[in-house]
Image: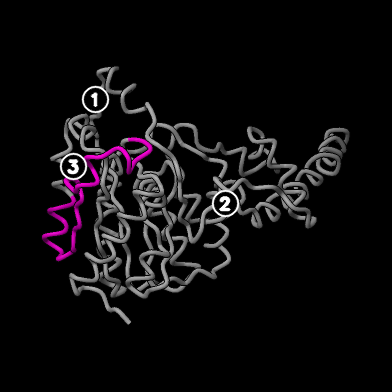
Amino acid sequence: MKKLIIKILLFVFLLYIPLYFLQNIVDKGLRKYREEEYSVWNDIFEGNINAELIIIGASRSFVNISPLLLDSTLHQKAYNLGIDGGDFNLAYTRLKVYLRKNKKPKTIIYSISTPDLQRSSEFYNMEQFIPYLNDTILRNGIEGYENSFKKFDYIIPAMKYRSYPKYYSIGVKLYYGASVNIEDGHKRINGYQARPRIWDSSFHTFKSSGKKYNIKPEFIFIKQFYELIDLCKKQNIKLYFVFSPEYKNVQPMFVNRDSIFAIYSTAARLNNIPFFNYSNDSISYNTKYFYNSEHLNQFGSEIFTRKLAMDIKNSSLISIH
């Protein structure tokens, strides 16, 4: 028994404690990282965004809507909280963390994607959450995904980085003040990422496969969707629903698209929420505005954002100062 205790103590001192300090260094270092999703999470946790207008949603949010262009017309400091590869649950989780760390906004734009209410089959880009796993709201929000973090990731120090070893060196470098190169295409400005790309072949590849999308909304996501509406009512936050343009020919590939949109349009009507739906906008018919069927390129996003800003301004539903 005595030998067992000695072995356990040796394990703690020789492995556990060094790994604990390593994890602490890497976590703190990555909280300075300015690449893509890390930059947004770090802005949120630093509590310095405090925007008057925020945009939430998935990748169609942070690629399609420029907060700086909204600000130039609506004169409200704007920030885009869109989360890459996210569904509604992840977008809502990010919003809840934001509201705990920052002042509440005057306005929220929920940028809708057709698959939002279906749980993502793949927990995409999960490394973005690693430095913040001690946050209860975030931790609860990422549970339930097939390839999410395991119990030992929370118990054994540094284990959560096991599949992403490159972040050890990045985190350590940043912790000790060294610089880390970030390519322009991986930066986000006020949460927005301009993508100066041209139309690719992904849509035609998918179309030729003959596959279709059948979106299966998850009950808990619909519940969260209505929680968002109630939250905005209780906190006197103006809420807008926006469906930004998508390439028109992709729409028939969502076999239950009408029923999905009925969820949003019904909620908008019953709760007096403005719903700006650009499904049939002229932008949707021309590939020069897109780099794939769901995402606008920089040219398209800037044209669309200016249009959205004017539509909101002309609706007289937002206080312009």
Q: Residues within 10 Å of mark 2 (few under 14, many from 20)?
A: many
Which residue does the image show at 63% across and 32% down from the upper left? 163
Neighbourhood count class around disc 1 (C-alpha, 10 Å): few under 14, some 14–19, many 20 upward: some
Mark nearer the viewer, 3 or 1 = 1
Q: Which mark is residue 260?
A: 3
Q: Which residues are magenta?
A: 264-292
**Residue at 31% over, 36% down:** 293
Q: How far apart in space, not on screen, are marks 3 and 2 (Cα)?
A: 31 Å
The kind of residue tagged 1 is Lys
Q: Give the image quarter of residue 87.
A: top left
CB under 8 Å between discs 3 and 2: no
The residue positioned farthest toward the top in the image shown: 209
Residue 281 placement, left or right of 177 = left
Residue 318 is at least partly visible in this image: yes
Query: Along the line of sight, which residue is nearer the eye, 153 or 289?
Result: 289
- Tag 3 secondary structure: helix
What's the residue type where badge 2 is placed?
Tyr
Note whether residue 57 is visible: no
Q: Is residue 155 left or right of residue 286?
A: right
Q: Amino acid at mark 3?
A: Ile
Q: Looking at the picture, how far across and down is residue 223, in whole percent?
A: 26, 51
Q: Secondary structure at mark 1?
A: loop
Quadrant of the snapshot with the N terminus: top right
**Crowd around label 3: few <14 · some 14–19 · many ≥20 (10 Å):** some
Residue at figure coordinates x 45%, y 45% from the top left: 196
Q: Which residue is mark 2?
A: 38
SS class, disc 2: helix
Residue sitting at 20 percent across and 57 percent down?
276
Counting from the top left corner in percent of width and height, residue 222 is at: 25, 48
CA separation in Å, label 2 and label 1: 33 Å
Q: Nearer the viewer, residue 268 or 276?
A: 276
